[in-house]
């Protein structure tokens, strides 16, 4: 049995979808950042263990300081300890002492955009499909039949990290994601919004990385710890349509925000009068917030940590998410003073809000 | 029994020594960075669980971009799981199922200096003393007798992180450390130099953080896994003298290097002719190297990781080690091209050398 909603196996449908989505997102970003003809540079890489990736990177753009929109489609063998660990969240996986390595497939799109203006928020999105199959005999392989799928699931999400708070941006971002989720069940957006707030949290700073969005994992036909039964997509067709709905929402969720924030906002900074000084202050604050982004990604993000520990992993693709520049000050005064725009966003990062 | 080489308990001797060493190092740095009267700012903090710290921070100096020279003298209770874990390296520690929390004392000096010039290397040093004692009865406490010490050990080291290689600097730094170690046994410098190369290694980059120095831990009267018996200080007096010898070597190991590197070096960069372009390139490379410094500290450094996970830890003091600014480029060309000064240091970071 192949997991499929059409004549095509799901892994092929995923590959087609993320390839198309990557291309659409790149076009949307290039349409904004064309002042000096900034273009994404494509970097295709092969994985010696199986599969490939296509990293598209923009640096030094007029409005985009650093962005990566990447897809990867890899396959290989999952060793027994990894299978054992995955069983907790995936009932379908077999496990006996005799279980040997099993073939896996993983396909996904991952993006991070760090704009230049301090008013323009950083955004991150990631959508992925994972599949574990039975080992085929040489005869089965030769027959061209797809391997029997033992477990499959989807994961993903998208979240916004502003340096300065614009409530209309937060509302727009969350509303767009909610509208993408709602057709598939009212419980999805609230559950995945909460999960996002919990996941993108920096314990040692006691603050969130940003103002959230949605985050989900392990979405399959099996019971899900975060979703009451009856409140969620119940078949593969619906789950796959839900994931595409989220993926398709990326451009409308972010591009309008980027468009209205790529120019300086007058009077943004309350305590400073002098324009050049206020520009310096805004940039300094943005770089301090990027320092926190680095702290989260290197210390807590599971994808980054898992990636860096994986032998043969492509480090440049994993660390593509880091900003071009980040800053650390000892006991910085920025973000502490009541009545400032920096303190305003800190209050939100310390106490996540409902935006819809 | 108190651990002591004089009438004073060792914890008091350590406190006096690190306080004096902190003051001397600050004076030596201020003597270099006085052009605009840059001064270290003292920040004393109390730990609610017991003890205090004195952070001395310099930012925005003429020659020093960011520096922290900190001491901390803390005490509290060590929970049973921590004691159990420490037993592996410390024979003296008791352990039964009935072991309860035990009092500990930790005193140490920790410093990181990030100079402004790309030619001037970053340096790090840390010397610390750890003690675990028996719980005293109220009567014993009232009598003023010190608690019985169950285990004690010293740890420390110092290492250099240049962005550009100057062989004379590497030789000077290592020679000075070796001269501080040698009076206490020929085996110390080679063992601790190797340990340093192993410790300050970034596996995902397959490169060292810098050109090393010395690193040691768990130095006590018990057998040490890295030191053959008969090749090391065999009593407390000698161990304490060894640690002070290392601590005292910091100023002569680093200050002469800083002094000769605080001005631009002409012709440092082989492939670029234009001066302003070469300054920009050197700065860019320095910031990329600082990005690696951040990666090591946040992903691998035990002190940082342990510190961030500790409830009530002082995050600003732990992350004081991070540079003011760091940079990440996707697949940067710098450091790749044969014949460049950037590739020269990369070769050393990929293949650590003997410098003495």
Image (cartoon, coloured by chain):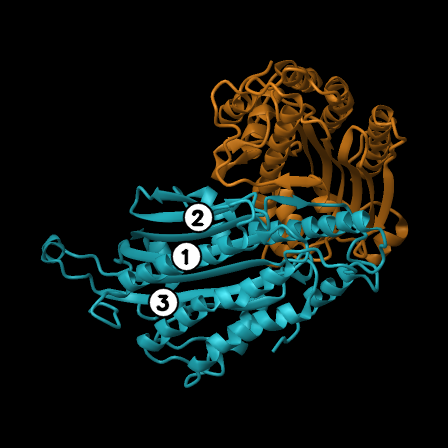
Chain colours: A cyan, B orange
Disc on res. A22: 1
Report whether mark 1 lies on the same chain as mark 3. Answer: yes
Disc 3: host chain: A
Disc on res. A153: 3
Disc 1: host chain: A
The residue tagged 2 is A56
Near mark 3 (Cα within 10 A), the count class, few <14, some 14-19 or many ≥20, is many
Q: Is residue B10 left or right of residue A113?
A: right
Q: Which residue: 29% across, 47% down?
A: A50
In which quarter of the view is residue A131 placed? bottom left
Residue B288 lies, with reference to residue B101, above or below; the image says above
Residue B74 visible in this rendered orientation of the protein: yes
| Residue B107 % position (x, y) | 77, 40
Disc 1, disc 2: CB below 8 Å? yes
Q: CA distance from mark 1 to mark 2?
A: 9 Å
Residue A166 lies, with reference to residue B229, above or below; the image says below
In which quarter of the view is residue A171 placed? bottom right
In which quarter of the view is residue B235 placed? top right
Q: Secondary structure at mark 1?
A: helix
Disc on res. B297: none
Q: Quadrant of the C terminus of chain A?
A: bottom right
């Amino acid at each position: 049995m192949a997991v499929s909603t059409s004549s095509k196996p799901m892994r092929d449908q995923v590959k087609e979808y993320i390839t198309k989505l990557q291309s659409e997102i790149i076009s949307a970003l290039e349409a904004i950042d064309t002042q000096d003809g900034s273009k994404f540079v494509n970097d295709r890489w092969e994985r010696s263990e199986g599969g490939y990736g296509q990293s598209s990177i923009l640096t030094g753009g007029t409005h985009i300081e650093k962005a990566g929109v990447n897809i990867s489609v890899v396959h290989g063998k999952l060793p027994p300890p990894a299978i054992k660990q995955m069983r907790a969240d995936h009932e379908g996986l077999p496990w006996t002492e005799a279980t040997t390595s099993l073939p896996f497939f993983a396909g996904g799109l991952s993006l991070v955009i760090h704009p230049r203006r301090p008013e323009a928020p950083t955004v991150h999105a990631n959508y992925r499909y994972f599949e574990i199959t039975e080992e085929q005999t040489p005869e089965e392989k030769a027959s061209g039949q797809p391997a029997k799928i033992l477990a499959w699931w989807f994961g993903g999400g998208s979240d916004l990290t502003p340096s300065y708070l614009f409530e209309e941006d937060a509302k727009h971002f969350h509303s767009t994601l909610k509208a993408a989720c709602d057709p598939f069940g009212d419980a999805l957006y609230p559950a995945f919004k909460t999960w996002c707030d919990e996941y993108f949290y920096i314990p040692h700073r006691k603050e969130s990385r940003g103002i959230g969005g949605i985050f989900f994992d392990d979405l399959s036909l099996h019971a899900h710890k975060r979703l009451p039964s009856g409140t969620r997509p119940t078949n593969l067709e619906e789950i796959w349509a839900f994931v595409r709905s989220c993926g398709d929402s990326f451009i409308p969720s972010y591009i309008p925000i980027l468009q209205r924030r790529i120019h300086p906002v007058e009077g943004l900074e309350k305590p400073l009068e002098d324009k050049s000084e206020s520009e310096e202050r805004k940039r300094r604050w943005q770089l301090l917030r990027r320092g926190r982004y680095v702290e989260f990604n290197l210390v807590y993000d599971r994808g980054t940590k898992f990636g860096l520990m994986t032998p043969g992993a492509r480090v440049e693709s994993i660390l593509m998410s880091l900003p071009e520049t980040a800053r650390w000050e000892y006991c910085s005064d920025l973000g502490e003073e009541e009545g400032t725009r920096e303190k305003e966003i800190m209050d939100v990062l310390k106490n996540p809000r409902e935006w819809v």
